[in-house]
Amino acid sequence: MKTWFTKILGVGAVALLLTACEKDEDKAVIYPNGGPTLTASATTLGTLSIDNATKEAVTFNWTGADYGYTAAVTYTLQLDMKGNDFKSPSEFTTTASKRTFTVAELNSTLLGLGIAPGSAGQLDARVISNVSNNTDYSQLSGVTSLTATPYLSVVNYPSLYVPGEYQSWAPEKAPRIASPASNGTYEGYVNFASASDGRFKFTSAPNWTTTNYGLSGTITTDPTTKVISGALSADGSAGNLTVPAAGYYRLVANVPSLTWTATPTTWAAIGSATPGGWDNETPLTYNTATGTWSATMALSAGGELKFRANNSWDINYGDTKADGTLEFGVPDNIKGPTAAGSYLVTLDLSQGAGNYTYSIRKN
């Protein structure tokens, strides 16, 4: 009897042991022993330059994370505005132990985080390690900070130049209106400081020796929208185009149809992040020195906004790619800050269509 019982007990113990082993094989045991250590090849980068766009700006290196066994670890490098506590970071995921940014990539990241061109911005960087996307075992590195000043990355789309009396008829110094679609329709904004400076022309190059466009026929003004319109002539001796009053005008020239329009505009921000929500816009003020529109306003956390002209949705801009560049009439809103507070909101329409930008900076 004792021998029979001992045999049964032995078989049961083996079965229990096998069952336990089977369960243990189904679930890996992880013992995080140390997260990655992050370093940067440089922390003070100065002013970035488009001339060095393809060159290396900075390389982030980190040591491997220790999970107590040979693990397939992924790393996510996070970059965010200094002091934002990584609430809305730009993220870059890799299985490697470093990430190199070219000048162009870092510049785009800085702009996307809301650092205005020409302004020194501070970034915080950290690395998160993980095993098979199991967030229960994420490990964080310490924070490394760097400072850099982004440049305005202007794409040279097909353009017309807008010389006029307001800038002494100098096409080589004139602002441009552009055609990102390369379809012969050009758009851009020009500020006419006074009615007496309202005469201008379009030129196909920054000189008077190539084709330039003046007035054909008469100018009409819509009494409701105040939109000025007319026909264009490619005859070099054609008369000047004119706007009747001082203001900040949206100019559109359609070369295939030889037509043009000028719409006077004033600008505002509107949206759930702004003080007036989607019902009441917050006006922006034009700065003649910088050629930008801006206002300091209290923004709420997690909201959105857009820029629009003339208290109407006829002319409005959103950000489709969340990259700091604006697109006309798109349904995509601009993401506001993740933390509530006082912010300087700036709209820059000075570089022609396709190169409209904005920034949202905490005061």
Image: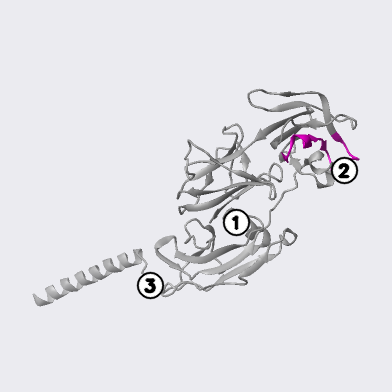
Q: Residues at badges 1 and 2 in contact (C-beta under 8 Å)?
A: no
Report the front residue among 34 and 222.
Answer: 222
Sequence-wise, the earlier of marks 1 and 2 is: 1
Residue that appears at 27% across and 68% down: 20
Sequence-wise, the earlier of marks 2 and 3 is: 3
Reply yes or no: does residue 200 show up in magenta.
yes
Report the front residue among 305 and 135.
Answer: 305
Q: Is residue 110 visible to us here? A: yes
Q: Which residue position holds label 1?
A: 115
Residues in magenta, as a range = 191-212
Residue that appears at 89% across and 40% down: 208
Q: Position of residue 270 (x, y in %)?
A: 52, 40
Quadrant for the N terminus, please: bottom left
Taking the image as shown, residue 105 lies to the left or right of residue 11, namely right
Secondary element type, mark 3? loop
Q: Which residue position holds label 3?
A: 31
Q: Position of residue 146 (x, y in %)?
A: 58, 67
**Residue at mark 1 to residue at mark 3: CA–CA distance:** 40 Å
Please determine whether, in this image, residue 134 is positioned above or below residue 305.
below
Residue that appears at 55% across and 37% down: 331
Report the front residue among 214 and 198.
Answer: 198
Identify which amino acid the numbered label 1 is placed on.
Ile
Categorize mark 1 by other alpha carbons within 10 Å: few (<14), some (14-19), many (20+). many
**Residue at mark 2 to residue at mark 3: CA–CA distance:** 70 Å
